[in-house]
Amino acid sequence: MAGWAARNISEIPTVTAGKADDPDWHPLQHFFGLTTFGANVFVATRGDESLVGEHDERSSGQQELYFVLEGEADFELAGERVRATRGTVIAVTDPTVKRLAVARAPGTMVLAVGASEGPFSTTWRESHFENVPRADWL
């Protein structure tokens, strides 16, 4: 095992949530076997779906960082709206802040990274990843 891996985003399997208003997402945390922080890329297929469902991180205590890789999304953070275009980085340092993001164009991609202080504990369930392969180096 090399201790590192590199893949193009197109090589990382997608999870389709199954509901019409949910985006596809690349489970980076699962694929690479990350255990100290969560990371996923959400992709808008239609261009009007929620990329980040409305939530806060009170129960996990996580801080989250969102990076718009492609396209454009409208974020709502503690009731304030932010238009985020390609290259925009949003940091949510207070776990109590309600947040959501909605794509404005097909192909919009948002990288989400999250972690709480101390040892990392995922908020995803193993059932999210049924039949989703991991990197071959694990």
Image (spheres, grey):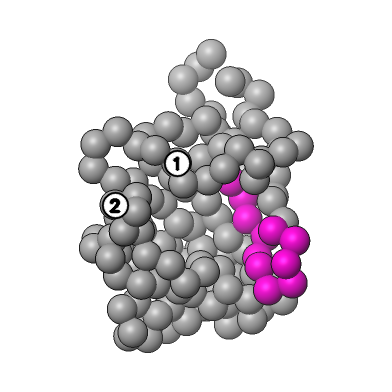
Q: Is residue 25 magenta?
A: yes
Magenta segment = 17-28
User: In the figure, residue 49 lies in which quadrant?
Assistant: bottom right
Q: Secondary structure at mark 1?
A: loop
Return the residue at label 1: 122
Q: Position of residue 103 (x, y in %)?
A: 57, 77
The spot of residue 26 in percent (x, y) is 62, 50
* Residue 111 x, y percent position in the rendering: 48, 57
For marks 2 and 1, give the CA distance.
11 Å
**Which label was assigned to residue 110?**
none
- The answer to whether residue 8 is seen in the rendering is yes
Name the kind of residue labelled 2 in the image: Gly
Counting the numbered discs, the total is 2
Q: Closer to the camera, 74 or 4?
A: 74
Q: Is residue 10 visible?
A: no
Q: Residue at x 64, y 31 (%)?
A: 134
* Residue at the image point whose x is 51% and y is 67% from the top: 52
Q: In the rendered view, would you say 128 is above or below 108?
A: above
Determine crowd level at label 1: few under 14, some 14-19, many 20+ residues with C-alpha closer than 10 A.
some
Mainly helix, strand or loop, the magenta region?
A: loop
The residue at the point 29 percent across, 46 percent down is: 116
Callout 2: SS: loop
Residue at 72% in and 67% down: 19
Binning the other alpha carbons within 10 Å of mark 2 as few (below 14), some (14 to 19) or many (20 upward) gives: some
Residue bearing the label numbered 2 = 61
Quadrant hosting residue 55: bottom left
